[in-house]
Image (spheres, rainbow, N blue to C red):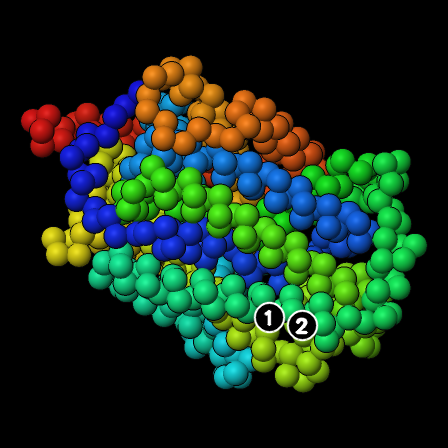
Amino acid sequence: MTASKHPEAETHLEQRLGLFSSTAIVIGSMVGSGVFIVDADISRGVGSPALLLAAWILTAVMTIIGALSYGELAAMMPKAGGQYVYLREALGPLWGFLFGWTLFLVIQTGTIAAVAVAFGKFLGVFFPAISATHWLWHIAHVPAFKLGPMVLGNMEIGVSTANLTGIVIVVLLAVVNIFGVSLGALIQNVFTSAKAIALAGLILLAFTLGRNPAALAANFGANFWAGGGWHDLHSVQVGVGGPLVLVNFFVILAVVQVGSLFSADAWNNVTFTAGEVKNPKRNLPLSLILGTGFVLTVYFLVSVGYLLVLPMHGDPNGQTILSRGIQYAAEDRVATAALGQILHSAGAWVMAAAILVSTFGCANGMTLAGARVYYAMSQDGLFFKSVGKLHPKYKTPVAGLLVQAVWTVVLCISGSYDQLLDYIIFAELVFYILTIVALFVLRVRKPDAPRPYRALGYPVLPAIYILLALWICIVLLRYKPQYTWPGLVLVLLGIPVYLFWQRKQTKTPLPEAQ
């Protein structure tokens, strides 16, 4: 195992995040905008209201078990970098680096780019001049080309008013977070509270004014279990343009986890900021458990709300919101369709405002957290030296925030972030599995290490998580290769980069080694 080359640097980060702020990072960082659209894709896959809700229950079970397991590691090693540190200490520096590499290249920056550009698109509801098709500088169109089961390319490169808005958000949040973790946390607290109120409002409207007799009869009558039996078969297309195959209950639930797990992703971001959390041995486990529990409960209730307002099954050529149903809501915007059914013309405005709040809070939480991982990597000599330095006054990783912002802007301009998002869940699942394996490894290697919090249900619950995540990975490798193999390749590309940094570190010893 390789310890940090600058252990004293951990004390330089100011511990200003209390329990509320750290919980707000968990809630705010989770990609909440996904819950507004993924139910359409899930419902097309499962074909049953019961299985739609079962998909969210599976996501909730996995995410909460993951949070319970990460809580022990976070309390045991409350250092900046979080998951990177756990992998490094348990499995070795290569695995920590591969996580940080993938986080920087795809997971963190790709998600920030996506939610920032989504902010711009939904701002266009209020200001029509902001649009993905309103180009200020159109550089090129990259044509689509098929590579095995995947279709790559098909991207517009340039600056539109929508992605320019996204770029402004990326730069703004990077600059804001330079001026101290307290300011970033304040913004997170405000927008997380607003996000929670918006989702609560959506649930309240659906459960009261939105209850639709036609939807209730279609979703909660005889059709509730239709196609949801143990022996029912479901159609899945293998890859892009591949053959249709029939799969059972267990396989289809694993396939549709791409959407629901993405909506619940980034819950682990609070561990990256562990060096700035007050009383981290108590607050980190609590924030993980409270944050994930709250968000997944809300997501489940939102999906129930959709079923109260709209019939699940619909016609892709339907002329009304009800005739299209959840499955074929316009552009998969189920929340917009639901609010449109309840509030009519005002629904689009209300939904756009809710998504603006959600995306801004998500982008801020991920911006604040991501730079702390690159900071920890730099401390180990595995990233640019400047990224491991803190601002003398604000005690923030300025270079890490700026490097992260620059790469995110590149992704915004390149238009590649949409495809990168397809690869995130598989890569994330691999590292979630490895991190929970690290929990077992450290129990064996360091049985006497202080553990202020011990994972609830150990070893049964962590083992269940590993088995469920492995099953989903295997299913996705088989039936959704367009989401898996590119992500695996991106992870493996980090190995030569790791060897490069190792060689560079050997040639240029760190100051104390000199």
**Mark 1 vs 2: CB contact within 8 A:** yes
Callout 2 amino acid: Leu
Depth check, front residue: 280 or 13: 280
- Residue 428 is labelled as none
Asked if 236 appears above or below 454 in the picture, the reply is below
Mark 1 and mark 2: span between their CA atoms? 6 Å
Q: Residue at x 67, y 72 (%)?
A: 205
Q: Quadrant of the N terminus?
A: top left
- Within 10 Å of disc 2 (Cα), the crowding (few <14, some 14-19, many 20+) is some
Residue 389 location (% of width, % of height) = 17, 46
**Element type where label 1 sits in the image:** helix
Q: Residue at x 45, y 57 (%)?
A: 28
Q: Quadrant of the C terminus?
A: top left
Residue 130 location (% of width, % of height) = 49, 79
- Within 10 Å of disc 1 (Cα), the crowding (few <14, some 14-19, many 20+) is some
Residue 108 location (% of width, % of height) = 42, 49
**Element type where label 2 sits in the image:** helix
Q: Residue at x 67, y 84 (%)?
A: 345
Asked if 153 appears above or below 132 in the picture, the reply is above
Callout 1 amino acid: Gly
Residue 1 horizontal side relative to residue 137, left or right: left
Residue 397 horizontal side relative to residue 298, left or right: left
Residue 513 location (% of width, % of height) = 10, 25
Q: Where does label 1 land, which residue?
A: 201
Q: Where does label 2 land, which residue?
A: 205
Name the image quarter holding residue 465. Answer: top right
Name the image quarter holding residue 314. Answer: bottom right
Depth check, front residue: 30 or 104: 30
Name the image quarter holding residue 84. Answer: top left
Residue that extends furthest to the left in the rendered view of this protein = 514
